Amino acid sequence: MHTRFHTAFSQLPASLQSALQPYMDTPDFPAMFDLSQVEAIKQRCGLDDDALAFALLPLAATCSLTPISHFNVGAIARGVSGNLYFGANMEFHGAPMQQTIHAEQCAVTHAWLRGERSLASITVNYTPCGHCRQFMNELNSGGELQIRLPGRDAATLADYLPDAFGPRDLAISTLLMDPVDHGFQLSLNDPLDQAALNAANRSHAPYSNAHSGVALETAEGKIHAGRYAENAAFNPSLPPLQAALVLLNLSGGDCRQIRRAVLAEPQSAILSQWDATRATLAALGCDAVSRITF
């Protein structure tokens, strides 16, 4: 089990510890449980879907990176598949606050990168801020997404974000988490380049068409790729680097141990991720950054 989970895990009820241990007691625990694992865990500890998600929040919060706020937030995204995905807030020392990732964004992106097609609910230990409410409004779940908070009645995203502005107001029909393949092709030999291009092909950028992806190679040689997730309100958009950092962190990697990185983006796009990607990676100690264009 990853050391970051030890304290929170030891404070869980014994029945839940016993149910979780077979899945978490491995060096490559992916910070998620698939449907078969969820059903086995519920059967062993007697919790329903909502109670299990609430019980997992302390574990998710241990994945937080908070050198600025020292305020850890955990989130659990439940996919329509029945899978559960961890999320946590992530901050980066030396980078602007605009480069941080909120726990709800993290959980949503984690599910998206793992191949989930839609979300049924988000469980979080603190009320979602306006930024996260707007970010989640881009999802194909729409206002029907269930928001679960400790000590509060069940509510939907539409309850938390009434009279919302979103993609449908701009005649956008392809929503965040809908399956896409933009078909960009390049002749590439480097697996890191290929991963970045593949991520760009599955990115969500219907407002700018500046589809982009980032791939990171860690010191251990592992590759983690992230896709751009654009938002109708623009500012809550999540850059592709942040998406890649979500997967790296939740997979148990160290965001300060990135050996090299690649950004894939259009050559003539009306916006570019290049400067922000280089600046944030420099704050993380990585200067080996390259760009491929299509």
Image: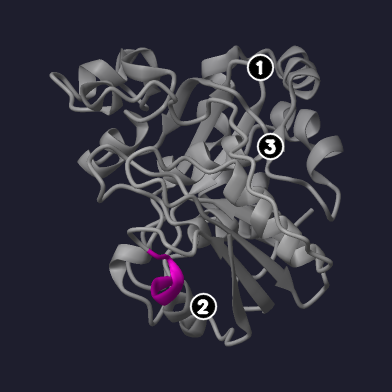
Looking at the rendered structure, the secondary structure element under dot 2 is helix
Image quadrant in which you'd find residue 268: bottom left
* Magenta span includes 275: yes
Tell me the residue that label 2 is attached to: 281
The magenta stretch is 272-276
| Residue drawn at x 18%, y 27% as measured from the top left | 165
Q: Which residue is mark 1?
A: 81
Taking the spot 72% from the left edge, 56% from the top edge, the residue there is: 195
**Dot 3 corresponds to which residue?**
32
Task: Decide: is 243 above or below 114.
Answer: below
Which of discs 3 and 1 lies nearer the camera? The answer is: 1
Residue 189 belongs to the span the image colors magenta: no
- Crowd tier of the residue under label 3, counting other residues whose Cα lies within 10 Å: few below 14, some 14–19, many 20 or above: many
Color encoding of the figure: one colour
Q: Is residue 280 above or below residue 57?
A: below
245 or 173, which lies in front? 173
Mark closest to the chain's N terminus, 2 or 1: 1
Left or right of 242: which side holds 11? right
Is 82 drawn above or below residue 149 in the view shown? above
Q: Is residue 30 visible?
A: yes
| Image location (x, y in percent) of residue 88 | 49, 49
